[in-house]
Image: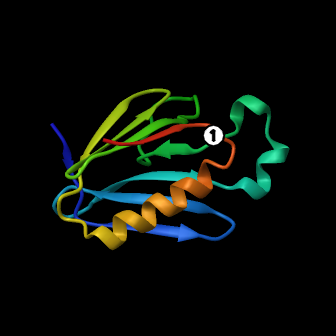
């Protein structure tokens, strides 16, 4: 079952962020975050796009593996789990903006992006 996404927000600065509001009231969000500026200071295995909802119960960093877009859904696979999000409430401009920032996040091809 897909989590309903009423909105999404994007930031394109030192931090590259794509954040999906989850649920009718968007009380939580699924956030994809990458800060290329500081990655040279990380170990190789720690580099990449962080995935999180803010309630992670794991001590390991959750990293992005793939993003698969379809007309009504986006599937986000991380090193820990698979998220299925219903994006039918989003307009095309929001989706295109998110895809643009995801392309910037993927400068080193660290994850797979597919349009299905």
Dot 1: within a 10 Å radius of its alpha carbon, few (fewer than 14), some, or many (20 or more) residues? few
The picture places residue 28, in percent across and down from the top left corner, at 32, 55
* Left or right: 37 as drawn, with respect to 55: right
Quadrant occupied by the N terminus? top left
* Left or right: 82 as drawn, with respect to 101: left
Residue 42 against residue 36 in the figure, above or below? above
Q: Quadrant of residue 88?
A: bottom left
Q: 96 or 50: nearer the eye?
A: 96
The picture places residue 93, in percent across and down from the top left corner, at 34, 73
Residue 52 against residue 31 in the figure, above or below? above
Q: Residue at x 62, y 37 (%)?
A: 110
Residue lying at the far right of the rendered structure: 41
Which residue is under mark 1? Answer: 109
Residue 95 against residue 38 in the figure, above or below? below
The picture places residue 74, in percent across and down from the top left corner, at 30, 46
Q: 31 or 10: nearer the eye?
A: 10
Q: Residue at x 35, y 31 (%)?
A: 82
């Amino acid at each position: 079952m897909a989590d309903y996404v009423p909105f999404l927000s994007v930031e394109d600065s030192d931090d590259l962020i794509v954040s999906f509001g989850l649920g009718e009231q968007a009380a939580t969000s699924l956030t994809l975050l990458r800060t290329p500026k500081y990655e040279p200071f990380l170990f190789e295995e720690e580099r990449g796009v962080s995935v999180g909802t803010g309630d992670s119960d794991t001590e390991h960093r959750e990293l992005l593996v793939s993003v698969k877009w379809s007309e009504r859904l986006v599937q986000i696979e991380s090193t820990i789990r698979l998220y299925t999000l219903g994006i039918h409430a989003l307009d095309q401009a929001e989706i295109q903006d998110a895809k643009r920032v995801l392309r910037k996040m993927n400068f080193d091809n660290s994850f797979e992006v597919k349009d299905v």
